[in-house]
Structures are given as C-alpha cells and as structure tokens.
Image (cartoon, rainbow, N blue to C red):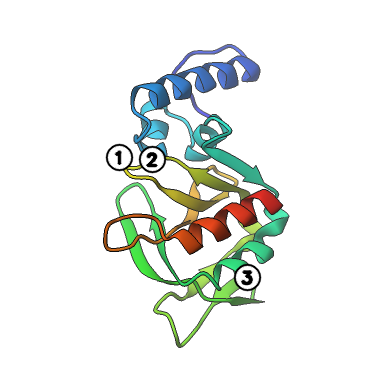
Amino acid sequence: MNCVCGAKNKDSVKEILAKRVAEMVANNPSKATGAMAAELEASEMDVIRCLPETMAKEVPKGRFDEIVEEVSTWGTLTVIVQNESTIMEVKAPFPKGTYGHGYYNLKSNSTPIGGHIKASELSAIFFVSKPFMGLESHSIQFFNGNGNAMFKLYLARDEKRQILTEQMEKFANLKNRL
C-alpha cells in the first residue's frame, strides 16, 4: 500500500488508511472505492478492506469456483472491467467457465460475455454493499495481488432502477453462507 499519510510503519499505515476511509464514507457514502483509492494513494483492495463490515465482507479466494458457478444462474448482471483509463460495462448473464491453459475460460453461446480469467492471480474476493450515485448497490468484486480489480459483478436493476429482489436474496444467501 502506498499511502500519502506518511506513517512510519505498516500498522500505522493501516490505521491511518482506515480512519481516512471512515471519514470519506461518513462525508459521502456514495463515493466510489476507486476514487477513494486514487485520492488516498492506496489500492482499491486496501480501501475496501477498510470499509465498515456493513459495506464489505471478504471471503476466501478459494471459493472462486463456487461463486462464479452460482452467479452464472442469477440472470443478467452488470460485469465491469476497468483500468486507470477505461471502465467497460456489459449487462448480460455471467457464463460458466472451464479451466485450461492457465485460465478460467468463459464461453457461452447464450451471453456476449467471454474471456479468460487468470484465477491463479486472484488475491481477494469481496461482497460489497455500498451506495453508488445515491442508489443502493451490491456487487461481488475480485482483486489481484497488486490490489487491482480483476472484474466486478453488480446486481441488476429493474426499470425503476431498483435492485432485483431475487438477485438480492441470492446475493445475501451466498454472502452469508461464505
């Protein structure tokens, strides 16, 4: 973690980061974790680890297969892949995958989502429930060892921009089970 706070050791860096994240959440609960990370000069993963327990739960990375298998049955999700210059969003069902050539390979004729996830680089998985742009928002976020998001899966909304009740129930059940 590279924090601007000037702490002398790792514990004080974590404490100062946690305090700064708490202040940001108190001032603007809808502020994106990526924006918080940029402002704090920290990784987004470290920022999420500092969110209140009501907003984020880290689950073992070894549950990756179980999670992606289950979300493939939830219907349309918003899949986000981003870097420092781009945020790509696709609203579609998340496909089941298979392992091969060092990747978890996504392929399905029933969804436009395809690609290759280097699951061996997965470092952390979070269930995040945090407002975004003033709206309720729930996601499962996958991070690599550098603290960068590999991809994020957001629950779908209806025509009134409300989270789909069935997906919210499945999200809550999976989060509680893990």
To which quarter of the image does residue 76 belong? Answer: bottom left
To which quarter of the image does residue 78 belong? Answer: bottom left
Q: The residue under label 3 is which amino acid type?
A: Glu
Q: Residue at x 34, y 28 (%)?
A: 28
Neighbourhood count class around disc 1 (C-alpha, 10 Å): few under 14, some 14–19, many 20 upward: few
Q: Residue at x 50, y 17 (%)?
A: 19
140 up-or-down from 38: above or below: below
Label 3 residue SS: helix
Q: The residue under label 1 is which amino acid type?
A: Gly
Q: Position of residue 10 (x, y in %)?
A: 63, 20
Residue 131 image label: 2
Cα separation between marks 3 and 2: 26 Å
Marks 3, 2: nearer the viewer: 2
Neighbourhood count class around disc 3 (C-alpha, 10 Å): few under 14, some 14–19, many 20 upward: some
Q: Residue at x 48, y 52 (%)?
A: 139
Q: Is residue 124 left or right of residue 42?
A: right
Q: Earlier in the sequence, mark 3 or mark 2?
A: 3
Q: Is mark 1 in CB contact (under 8 Å) with mark 2?
A: yes
Label 1 residue SS: loop
Q: Position of residue 72 (x, y in %)?
A: 55, 72
Q: Position of residue 71 (x, y in %)?
A: 56, 66
Q: Residue 162 or 139: which is nearer the viewer?
A: 162
Give the residue pinned by disc 1: 134
Q: Residue 133 or 97: which is nearer the viewer?
A: 133
Q: The residue under label 2 is which amino acid type?
A: Pro
Q: Is residue 93 left or right of residue 88?
A: right
Give the residue pinned by disc 3: 69
Neighbourhood count class around disc 2 (C-alpha, 10 Å): few under 14, some 14–19, many 20 upward: some
Cα separation between marks 3 and 1: 30 Å
127 up-or-down from 153: above or below: above
